[in-house]
Amino acid sequence: MSFLRPPPAGTKLTPWVPDLIFIPISRAFERLGVYFYNRVVSRTEMGLFDKRWNKNIHGPYCHWRYYGKRDTKFMDVKLGELGGWVGRRDKTIGAFYNEFVRNIWRVHNLYYSGPVYNNTVKTIFRFVFIYSFLNWLVKMHRYWDFQKTMYHW
């Protein structure tokens, strides 16, 4: 295991050529990532618990649950009340992001990790089906000409 020993004193080592290219690039990306985190991400509420969540009232935190004040469902809103209902909505980017993440967690809990769907085999077959369907979708155009000429011989 001579490659683990340090080289003798006075040995001049020249860096490998891809290292001369990739190390500065990777350091630049690392510095940009740290800058972006310190200037943008750390000043937002991304990844934090909802401020309205109270452990004593709601119990353990559920990512897919909305902890704000309940409002009338969209399907129950009358046409005359629609303007006020839309005015009560939070239309910030953070609200859209939180709703998106809540829906991702809700789907994950319903279909991949909930009490009913915790079977590993079902999850594997779902991914196999999705993979097969997407491959069929991508290669579907190969069979269009064949379908047009199938009965014309």
Image (spheres, grey):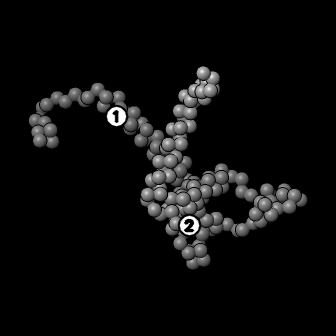
Q: Which mark is residue 23?
A: 1
Task: Say which residue appears at 15% left-offset and 38% top-offset.
Answer: 3
User: In the rendered image, which quarter is residue 50 located in?
Assistant: bottom right
**Is 122 displayed left or right of 23 in the figure?**
right
> What is the secondary structure assignment of the residue under circle 2?
loop
Decide: few, some or many residues near mark 1? Use Cα within 10 Å; few <14, some 14-19, many ≥20. Answer: few
- Foreground: disc 1 or disc 2: 2
Dot 2: few (<14), some (14–19), or many (≥20) neighbours within 10 Å? some
Quarter that holds the C terminus: top right
Residue farthest along the top direction in this orientation: 153
Of the pair 2 and 146, the residue shown nearer to us: 146
> What amino acid type is highlighted by mark number 2?
Cys
The structure residue drawn at horizontal position 19% and vertical position 30%, both measured from the top left corner, is 13
Residue of label 2: 62
Q: CA distance from mark 1 to mark 2?
A: 41 Å
- Residue 138 position by quadrant: top right
- Mark 1, secondary structure of its residue: helix
- Across and down, in percent, residue 87 comes to 79, 57
Of all residues, the one furthest to the right in this rendering is: 80
